Image (spheres, grey):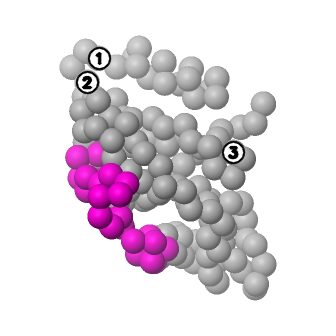
Amino acid sequence: MRTLAALLLLTTLSLPAHAGRLPVVLLEHLDNDVLALSIEESALASIPDWQPGRGPVPLSEDSLIDEVRSWALNLHPDFDDVRILEIVLKPIESPRYGTRWHYLVALQGVTDGRPAGRKIFLAVLFDGTIVHGILEPKV
């Protein structure tokens, strides 16, 4: 986590005064790992407004799984299939847009019936946007 904090500080200090807004950086815990996600604040505006208990989730679980599977198989044509390992519903707090929600997803490719490669961690915004996360090194 120190690496990410140092990188963010360096990025902030090196930006000119006229630079646009910094992205929203989330540090999420998923599957016993820490995942760093960078989401442009303007992307939060396109996420449908939803609060728990106030109607159905804008991106259903079936649609989520279809989106993630298509994304992963397109990016990794060597996978025969994709195994979803974990799905977590999480909020994103933004001073400008309030609370928005997204899914955190852990998945792994499957080739010849066996796990292929490393686990892949994603955030899926309620508008279907997929944000690939960076796994923080364990210290």
Query: Left of 134 or right of it: where is 39?
Result: left
Q: Which residue is mark 1?
A: 16
- Quadrant (top left, top right, bottom left, bottom right) of the N terminus: top right
Q: Earlier in the sequence, mark 2 or mark 3?
A: 2
Residue toward you, 40 or 96? 96
Q: Rounded to the nearest whole Å, what is the CA distance between mark 2 and mark 3?
A: 32 Å
Q: Position of residue 131 (x, y in %)?
A: 45, 53
Kindly check if marks 3 and 1 are in contact, taking CB atoms under 8 A apart as contact: no
Kindly check if marks 2 and 3 are in contact, taking CB atoms under 8 A apart as contact: no
Q: Is residue 65 above or below residue 36?
A: below
Looking at the rendering, the stretch of residues picked out in magenta corresponds to 44-67
Q: Rounded to the nearest whole Å, what is the CA distance between mark 1 and mark 2?
A: 5 Å
Q: Earlier in the sequence, mark 3 or mark 1?
A: 1
Residue type (three-letter) at the residue carrying disc 3: Asp
> Which numbered marker is on residue 33?
3
Residue type (three-letter) at the residue carrying disc 2: Ala
